Amino acid sequence: MASRFEILYKLDQQTYSVGLPVVITGGNLLQDNYNGRLFAQLKLKSISFRQISAVEVMIQTMDNYNRLVETIAFVYDNLRLYRDNTAGDDISIPLEDNRGKKLNAVVTAVVDSSGNEWRENAPKVSVIEEAAPLESRLDGDKQLAKQYRLKYGFEHNYAPTVGEGIWTCSCGAINLDEEDACHSCGFLRKEIMNPDFNALEQDKRQRQKKEKEHTRNIIIIGIAAALVLAIGIIVISVISPKETFEDEYYDESYEEEYPVEEAADEGYEDPYYIVDEVYYTQAVLKVREGPGKDYRQLTRDELAGEDYYNSEDYPDALLKKGSPVVCLEMSGDWMRIESGWICVRDGDETLVE
Ligand SMILES: [Zn+2]
């Protein structure tokens, strides 16, 4: 059976009225198949650091020849819209004329919770282009992109853009022109727009050199371990040729010196992180309630020490790169610190050292 509502037209570009701090991130023109009535549905996103309480939009429908069918104004009221939060997608706005085939919508006024109103009766509408991947501004250099993320944080996946009255950060956040720092990640606009590519390139080379040395050391340790083991086997064979290697001696001494990676997650001691030792974050890291990405991210207020900080406007807890943390417990790739849990590895990347 066909569903009752059918989507006739989709708005799939993010648009905003220049000077008004609300973005229309999507929209649908819906038809009720029972009676042919049309409805408009919009998704609004706040880009204001003030709480938004009302948004007025102008909605237009057109026929297939782009001739105007209908223009209506609609007010979303009683919103409690904080920055980056969305609203409207659960509200169907009834239209009067059922001949519309296409939809257009612009924001004409925004009111904040203190009653301040921004209004543009003939707004200039601008499109927020879909962000290009970060690699595209680094000549496709994946290792340089990795270095960039190590420096700024792993959510930095996009090439930043500049629009009229706004700029988008490499973390994906939309900022207002008047904001010198990204409200989400806290990095300065001028740094995000013009990072020191030479320094980044140097850091990349140094890291790659270190990684090579690390691999070589592991191989050397592996060879040394094999030699120690071989000598052990020979000595045991000589002293007591009839004994087997199921003894505790073999298991314990070997495991203690060269912990194997397959050790079970629960209650195992991580070979690289020791309880009560101090480590330093190598990237901007989120703090969560438990050991895993499904756990809730803590807010700034829930953090313990002063080394944890980021942009004033951003409520979520971020540890700045270089923050000292004391390891209290390990669970897989997650470390428990005073205020919560942080991820110490992402694939082969070490996030805490
Ligand atoms: Zn950012």
Image: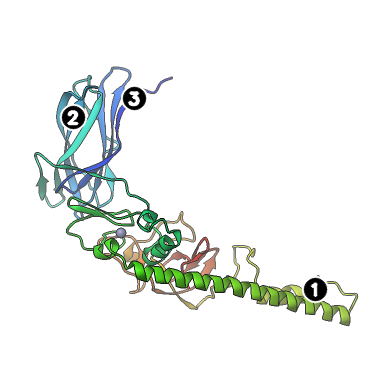
Quadrant showing the N terminus = top left
Residue 75 left/right relative to 292: left
* Nearest the eye: 340 or 109: 109
- Ligand 1 visible in quadrant: bottom left
The residue mark sitting in front, 2 or 1, is 2
Dot 2 beta carbon under 8 Å from ligand 1:
no
Camera-nearest residue between 101 and 4? 101
Mark 2 or mark 1, earlier in chain: 2
Q: Which residue is mark 1?
A: 247
Task: Residue 287: tell me if it is visible.
Answer: no
Residue 250 image point, x, y percent: 76, 75
Residue 58 in which image quadrant: top left
Query: Percent from the top left, x then y, of residue 141?
Result: 43, 59
Residue farthest right in this picture: 242
148 lies above or below 58: below
User: Circle 2 sits on which residue?
Assistant: 60
For marks 3 and 2, give the CA distance.
Answer: 19 Å
Amino acid on which the number 1 mark rests in the picture = Asp
Cα distance, mark 3 to mark 1?
71 Å
Tell me the distance, in whole angstroms, between the alpha carbons under discs 2 and 1. 81 Å
Please tell me whether mark 3 or mark 2 is closer to you in this view.
Answer: 2
